[in-house]
Structure formats: C-alpha cells, structure tokens
Image: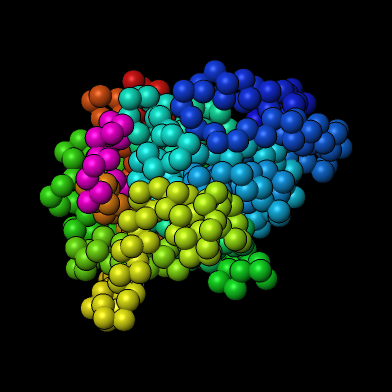
Amino acid sequence: MANGLRDGTVSSEALVDAHLARIDARRELNAFIHVAADSARMEASVADRVGHARSQLQPLTGIPIAIKDNILVKDVPCTCGSRMLQDWVAPYDATATGRLKSAGAVILGKTNCDEFAMGSSNENSFFGPVRNPVDPERVPGGSSGGSAAAVAGFQAAAALGSDTGGSVRLPAAFCGVVGLKPTYGAISRWGLIAFASSLDQVGVLARTVEDTRLVFDAIRGFDPRDSTSIAVPPVRRIPDELTIGLPREYYGEGLDPEVRRAITHAAEVLQADGHKLVDVSLPHSKYTIAAYYVVCCAEASANLARYDGVKYGYRTPVTEDLLTMYGRTRAEGFGTEVKRRILLGTYVLSAGYYDAFYATAQRVRSKIAGDFSEAFRTVDCLLTPTAPTCAFKLGEKLNNPLAMYLMDIYTTSVNLAGLPAVSVPCGRSTAGLPIGAQIIGRPFEENLILSVAEEVERQQRMTNSAG
Ligand code: GLN
C-alpha cells in the first residue's frame, strides 16, 4: 500500500474506502466496536495532500490502521469492551495513537476485545463475540480478537492490540497473522487503559513481519508520561548463526499433535538455514498460569477500583445512597469475568492471604524470570508454540474458566518476565486452521526475534506457493 501511495497508483482515500467496504461486507465478524469512517476519510485526504509532496511521505502515511478499544483515540469512544465505558469518549490520544497519527497513519476505528482485555477468546465482550475470519464458527482468540480478525479479514492494514498475558500473540496465532508483544517498557502505556500494569504492553498485529516492524518502529521509545517506558537502545548486530532454544516444558503433554508437527517443522527449517537448535529447560514453567492469574487479578482489582459511577462511565439509576450506588454500578457495569477477577484479586491481596498467595506469586514470578535469564546465557532466542491448540469453537470453553486460562500456558511467562515475543504463522492444521510459532527474545531484542520470524515466514511463503 505504501509503495502504491508513493508511486501515485493509489490514494489513501481509495485505501480507506476499500477497507470501509470490507468492514461492511464482513460485519458478521464483529471485529469493530466503532468505525470512525468520517474522521478516517478526512485523515486520508490530508495524507493524500501530503502525498503530493512525495518527500514528506513516511512509511505509514495514509495507511489505514485499527486500534484495540482499550487504547485511547481522542474524541472517539473507548469502551474496553465493557458496559461500564459504553458511552465514554476519550479526551486525549494514547502515546501509541499519537505517534501513529504523527507518522501519517489513518485511524480506521476501534476493535472489539474481551472486557478490560480479560480473556483468551474474545467472548467476554459486552458487544458480543468476534468471529474468526478463517472459520466464523470459531473464536479469533483474545483478548485482541477484533484487531486480529480485522487484520486477517483485510479490514485494516495493521492494528494495535494490548498484551498482558498473550492477548496479541494468541489471536495472531488463531487468525494466521503476525503478533508482536514488545519488551515491557518498549512502547509507552500512556492512554492504554490499565488491566495489570506490571504486565500490560501495547503490541502490533499485521499480516507480515515487515509491516509489524514498520508499525512498531513508529510507536516505540521513551515517553515522559510513562515512567516505565524506555528509549530505543542500540541494536546488537544479529549473528548469522543463532542458537535457538527449545524449552522442553513447552512441548509436553497438552500440546496438540498438529501444532507440535508445525512447530517442529519450523525448527527444522531454521536448522536448515544454519541455526543451531538446543534443548533447554525452564523449570518453573508449571507455575506460570497460577502465578500469572494471581498477579494479574491482584493488579486488576486495584486498577478497576476507579470505576465507581463517579469518575468514569456508567452509573446505575438507583442512587439512593452512596454505597448502594457504588455496589449497583459495579454489579451492573461489569461482566462475569471481570467480577471473577476482581473477587480473586481482592482475595489474594487481603490481609490474611497476602503472604500465602500474592507474595508467593511474586516470588514465583522472579523464579520464572530467572529461568529465562539462565536460558539466555546459552541461547539467542527461544522457539515455542504460541498456543497449545488451534482456534476452538465459539462457546466451547465458556463454562470452564480454567480450560480457558490454560490457553495462555505458553504466553503468560513472557509477560511475567517482561520479555519480547512474536507469534508468526507457521502452517495450518488439516482442517485449515492457522498455527502460530512463538519466538521469545532477550529484553529489547525485538529486532532479532523479528528476523527469525521472517525466516519462518519466508519458508511459509515458499510452501504456500509450492502448494
Ligand atoms: N488471556 C489472558 C487473560 O485473560 C491474557 C489477557 C491479555 O493479555 N490481555 O488474562
């Protein structure tokens, strides 16, 4: 698209119209909560005017991009997939949004997501589930399911998501697109509505690794408004021959045989490219899900205390006294999963249980981070499956939260340790469902993991064109 804009063979207005038509044609995917058609057309016409002075074209000028509905876009509704924020309009741009706009990108609209980004299937949205464009009877993965479906369904050129425990990578894997969760601090969280602040990161979903890089480069870097954000560090030259670790705990029981086959094939391809594969161990992996759900619920229970009917969003009509108003607002405004997390979170933080649960989870978290540091003494990156299975049917796991939580078994450890990881398509199941390979890197080595992802992608392209 950028090449077309540069040679003048296409206009940004035409690109925006084509994407809007596509959003309309596949409404059943329910990928968008809000389509910003008018402002997108206006931004496109500005981009086209800039485009006439070709020297001012940046890589994203005029490119239509979608934003997950928990990232603020000024003067556009931001619901977080929740009744609580159904009518709330963002008063300012998130840093990531602002940087996309300064890079000339056109904001197409806000994508559907699990309520407050809590979920793995995008079925926890107040605005209804998103469907997987590859098979609409199946979930797109969550919580950035709308962003993944929009990108896979050609309703946006790329999209922003957020990843607290896998929410960019899992939907990327289920929909067959690329999903990057950068190092904690690589992208400012200013204007990303908080779920679990020590784990949350803005991430990028796109159809190719190259597109992912373009968007990431436009939005990364230090922001004085987020004290955990960090300037782009100098990149290490990527050695031609890498040592790639295969953590044995990620290839154990519970991994679908078709997923295993596809990841093993990706590993063999990397080996044939001249890289060295080594077996490594991350011995605390079995505690990952437990530690993650204690930490994320604890932080969520604190972050979500602000939705009290006074400061933001929904307020119950029953307001006879303050306490009843608080209680009813929260009972009516939040969905089941959000309530479950607030209850779990307040429980693990309560005086009698803090040491047993929260403090223990924090100790486990540092053990998990330690496992990665140990592995990275001998390997340059790790290759694992992104998810244990392919996309499942809508409704299949709704009544079993634990089975749903287990979808995050290979992704949450990365957030607990603050590392960068990318999910890249590496094949399809016999039923034609996409499979994602996850490449995990050292802090701030996005460049390295993306280049490994590119090798996997190249091989996929060759297989597809041969097929
Ligand atoms: N599926 C995980 C959860 O429900 C991850 C969510 C996320 O990354 N936002 O918490």
| Place of residue 10 in the rendered image (x, y in percent of width and height, measured from the top left) | 73, 24
Q: Which of the 4 quarters of the picture holds residue 273?
A: top left
Magenta stretch containing residue 391, yes or no? yes
Q: Quadrant of the image for the C terminus?
A: top left
| Place of residue 340 in the rendered image (x, y in percent of width and height, measured from the top left) | 32, 56
Q: Which residues are magenta?
A: 386-402
Instruction: Look at the image and tell me whether residue 50 can be seen.
Output: yes
Magenta stretch containing residue 344, yes or no? no
| Place of residue 289 in the rendered image (x, y in percent of width and height, measured from the top left) | 26, 60
Is residue 409 or residue 239 the one in the foreground?
Answer: 409
The single residue placed furthest to the top in the displayed view is 25
Q: Residue at x 83, y 42 (%)?
A: 55
Seen in the image, is 374 located left or right of residue 440?
left
Using the image, determine if residue 65 lies above or below residue 133: below
Q: Quadrant of the image for the N terminus?
A: top right
Seen in the image, is 340 located left or right of residue 282?
right
Q: Residue at x 54, y 56 (%)?
A: 319
Using the image, determine if residue 88 lies above or below residue 137: below
The single residue placed furthest to the left in the displayed view is 253
Q: Residue at x 37, y 39 (%)?
A: 123
Q: Which of the 4 quarters of the picture holds residue 11?
A: top right
Please tell me whether the stretch drawn in magenta is mainly helix, strand or loop. loop
Q: Residue at x 23, y 59 (%)?
A: 247
Using the image, determine if residue 282 lies above or below residue 86: below
